[in-house]
Image (cartoon, grey):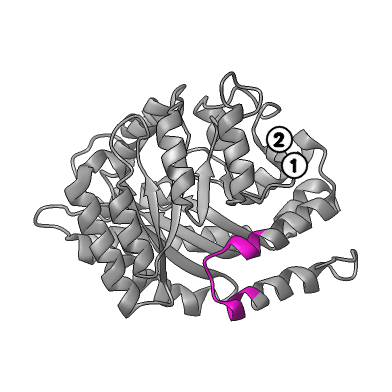
Amino acid sequence: MNLEKFCHDLPKLELHAHLNGSLSADTLKELYKMQNSELGNYEDVFMDMKDFSTLNECFKVFDIIHLLTVTPEAIFHATYNTIKEFQDDNVIYLELRSTPRAIPEKMSKQEYVEAIIKAFEVCKIDFPNILVKLLISVNRKQGYKAAQENIELAINFMKKYPQYIVGLDLSGDPMTGSIFLKLLKKARMAGLKIAAHCAEVSNETEAIDILEFKPDRLGHCTCVHPTLQGTNKLFNLLINSKIPVELCLTSNVRCKTVPTYESHQFKYLFEVGHPICLSTDDKGVFHTSLSQEYKIASSTFNLSREQLIKLCLSSVQYAFVTSEEKEVLLSKIKNFYCKEYTIKD
């Protein structure tokens, strides 16, 4: 079995996937036709999505995608397609994350979340091989009031749909906005897990604040790197925290937050045995898949197939699932490969 097929067949967990950024080109075209708007020619509208060279340009891509996700019907369709595509990639567990949006006369924030949950319910029947959860996102750039609204929304929906709403995601442009620590504490007290984007840009004060808050998982941490000048303190804080980090190789290289795959912080975190998991971030925007991310990690850092399996097994421990769900996920991975490898707990 060649590496590409192995990585595809490997039962995988996706712990860092933004809904809107995960929309494939096919899904965007379908949404474009559904909207029947006057946006212009499809190719012209989405031409700017093909190439970008900075993190800031990457965030502008989402402004384009958001033009098509403005109704509950579009959100349902986007969610349904995305779950199907992850299952087709042999992802057995998916945590989607998304910032609720209100569109005047078209959709409220509550209707946005309800559309996602409706898609989850349908996919549970149509795609039984994948378990799906939702993290409601707080976008730094949108300010305190929006953050407060989204956290209240997450708490209320968690009470009604605890099987689906499991956490809160702190995300958005790291160059603007706040981390809303008091609101994050409120979410934690209510029982929500916290995943926080951390150190995507150089901001030691914010990174320390996030690390000291101790989220359940961290996203990226591209500027927490032992070879970058002045980051040894942050690196040591991260290692001592033992907080799992969601690593998105292609995303970081495409956004130029790391220069090359070879210099990615994966290498240093993996070598010291820090808890990590591989993720796509935005598979549609970056034209990747979780299978592709595993293949890149294996080729770049000379990982054996057994090491890839163990990455999947360890990812189960960081997933926002129940003990019973963890056992099911672990069994799927172990049972699939028990004939080829001896996996130690």
At numbered mark 2, what does the secondary structure look like: helix, strand or loop? Answer: helix
What residue is shown at x 45% (from left), y 29% (from top)?
204
- Using the image, determine if residue 41 lies above or below residue 277: above
Residue on which the image places disc 2 = 268
In this rendering, the count of numbered labels is: 2
Residue 319 lies in the magenta-colored region: yes
Please report the bounds of the magenta region as a residue range. Answer: 315-326
Density class for disc 2 (Cα within 10 Å; few <14, some 14-19, many ≥20) is some
Is residue 91 among the parts visible in the rendering? no
In this picture, residue 35 sits left or right of residue 78 = left
What residue is shown at x 27% (from left), y 38% (from top)?
141
**Amino acid type, label 2:** Tyr
In this picture, residue 248 sits left or right of residue 25 = right
**Disc sitting over residue 313 in the figure:** none
Residue on which the image places disc 1 = 272
**Amino acid type, label 1:** Val
Residue 264: % across, % down: 65, 31
Judging depth in this view, the residue of 275 and 310 nearest the camera is 275
Residue 205: % across, % down: 41, 32
Is residue 307 among the parts visible in the rendering? yes
